[in-house]
Amino acid sequence: MILYGGINMHTIDKYSDMLSIKEVCEYLCISRYTAYKLLQNKKIKYVKIGNKFLVTKNSLAKFLGVE
């Protein structure tokens, strides 16, 4: 079992393929500020649609090193 920020990696299945910043924060147990910093510093790849930032499950897996 892999844990990150106190969250079991298997719980990612409850999210859709594209996660909002709110969902990323919830999943990783981090603040919105930290989430945006990770995007800004290109630690997590994202797609911007209009004014929304979306992160794929695959991008999160790469960030966590669990592809």
Image (cartoon, grey):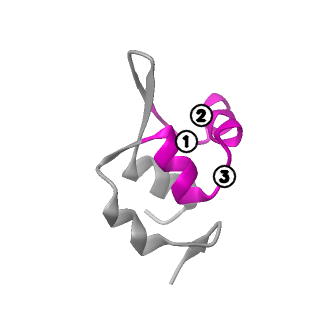
Residue at (51, 48) in percent of width and height: 24
Q: Residue furthest bottom?
A: 1
Q: Which mark is residue 44?
A: 1
Q: Residue furthest left?
A: 16
Give the side of residue 15 with respect to residue 1, left or right.
Answer: left
Give the side of residue 60 with respect to residue 16, left or right.
Answer: right
User: Marks 2 and 1: CB-CB under 8 Å?
Assistant: yes
Instruction: Looking at the image, tell me whether mark 3 or mark 1 is earlier in sequence order.
Output: 3
Which secondary structure lies at badge 2? helix
Q: For the C terminus, which image quadrant?
A: bottom left
Give the side of residue 21 with respect to residue 4, left or right.
Answer: left
Residue 11: x, y in percent?
41, 70
Please, what is the three-letter code of the amino acid marked with disc 3?
A: Ile
Which secondary structure lies at badge 1? loop
| CA separation in Å, label 2 and label 1 | 5 Å
Residue at (48, 52) in percent of width and height: 60
Closest to the camera, between mark 3 and mark 2, is: 3
Which secondary structure lies at badge 3? loop
Residue 42: x, y in percent?
61, 34
Which residue has dot 2 on it? 39
Instruction: Looking at the image, tell me whether mark 2 or mark 1 is earlier in sequence order.
Output: 2
Residue 13: x, y in percent?
32, 65
| CA separation in Å, label 3 and label 2 | 13 Å
Give the side of residue 67 with respect to residue 28, left or right.
Answer: left
The front one of 3 and 27 is 27
Residue at (64, 39) in percent of width and height: 32
* Magenta region: 20-46
Which residue has dot 3 on it? 30
